[in-house]
Amino acid sequence: MSVTFLREHLRFTRRYFMQMGVAGLSAISFSPPSTKAEESSRELPKKMELGDGIKKSKSLITSQAQFYDVSRGQPIPHTLPDDKKREVGMTRDTWKLEVIADPEHRAVVRQPMSKEQGTSFDFDKLMNLAEKRAVRFGKVMTCLNLGCPLGYGIWEGVPLRDVIWLTNPGDDVRRVFYFGYHNDDPKQIFRSSLPMSRVLEDPFDLPPIILCYKLNGEWLTPERGGPVRIVVPEAYGFKSVKWLTHVVLTNLFHANDTYAEQGNDIDSPLKTFAATINAPQDVKAGEKIVVSGYAQVGINGLSKVQAWIQNADEQPMEGDRYYERAPWVDMEILGPPDDWGSELKEGKIPLLTHGFDSSSGKPLSWPMRLGMIHWAGVFPPLARGSYIFRCRAIDEKGGAQPMPRPFRRSGFAAIEQVSFKVT
């Protein structure tokens, strides 16, 4: 989670707490979720004060520089010297994409895009397509095995299917494999795949899978996978392969994903979950207890965020593994911002962005799927003692976190818990 998002969270929740009549806001400290921070090697700020700089922060969108990076490779491709990047096609003027048939499980590709044949697809051709076919959408990028999003942005590109159709494929293509540059080392190859049906058609209200070249209106940097990467709207980050070099059309019926070899559920879409940013720490008797955090809005949407404070001396209900019978309290889901971030022109969402009104640039619904929101709440004072704070999300189908998919290998969504004392 970026520092900008944390600062914006302070601004949003400060206004909410003032409306609720909570005093002493300048002393509120905001910490990353303890249980999730322990599982991530990323460094997050331990405490932030409500200073003037934080009050002025208005960003929901994560700038490219503030995305957290979990790139693979030794060396990581974006750290290569500029001349090496040019040599391997990691600049816009040298990028070449091959779209070919799988030689082992052959599918018919009548007009392959191949370096050998001099027909590879380059950046100029991509931009020609983009003049009429470009799409934009908001998406939170999250790693399957981390309990905290890497960043949220507006991604722009050309639908992958538009490029595939240029190769005139036969009807025997069942799956699309794709690869990114990884130092020409077979041991470092990172690959993913999708059913051809998902590439060609967008279910429900999802945007298309894209060959992405911009983030927040700016050219995609090498750190973010530029010049061109795949972005799969509903998927975890490993599906959105960086530094794209090859697309292979195959008749093979199963996936070849790198993550599949590590025991992960490669077809699991983004989960809905809530987590804390401001959790109770040392609270004085007689004080209201302010709590706040964020939620990732997954494929099933978000209807509620709830929280619960349990006396630490109470025994958990037998057989209630996910605390479904606990006395949860609804929190307030805070609305969309007026200013979406300094990386966007005038802080506005670009027109013709999927999920936003085409004239006003405002969200068509809130919370938006595949995005992030802020939430906040106030509990009445508690007696002296030890307590445990928990929060959870409820999706639009009534599924309570971590359900309906509680398994870690299909994406992190555990219920966070924070211990604190009232003195």
Image (cartoon, grey):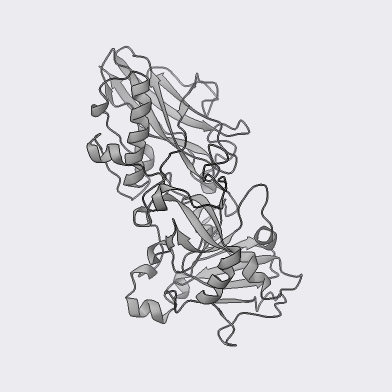
Tag count in the figure? 0
Residue at 57% from the left image edge and 62% from the top image edge: 134
Q: Does the image show residue 171? A: yes
Q: Does the image show residue 76? A: no
> In the current view of this chain or complex, which residue is farthest to the right?
171
> In the current view of this chain or complex, which residue is farthest to the front?
359
Quadrant into which the C terminus falls: top left
Q: Nearer the viewer, residue 67 or 385?
A: 67
In the rendered image, residue 395, in percent from the top left (x then y), is placed at: 57, 34
Task: State whether residue 45 is above or below residue 352.
Answer: above
In the rendered image, residue 247, in percent from the top left (x then y), is placed at: 59, 71
Residue at 39% from the left image edge and 65% from the top image edge: 221
Question: Residue 278: which quarter of the image?
Answer: top left
Task: State whether residue 401 is above or below residue 254.
Answer: above
Residue at 32% from the left image edge and 11% from the top image edge: 383
In the rendered image, residue 335, in percent from the top left (x then y), is placed at: 47, 33
Q: Nearer the viewer, residue 315 or 385?
A: 385
For residue 171, side relative to residue 276 (left or right): right
Task: State whether residue 381 is above or below residue 96.
Answer: above
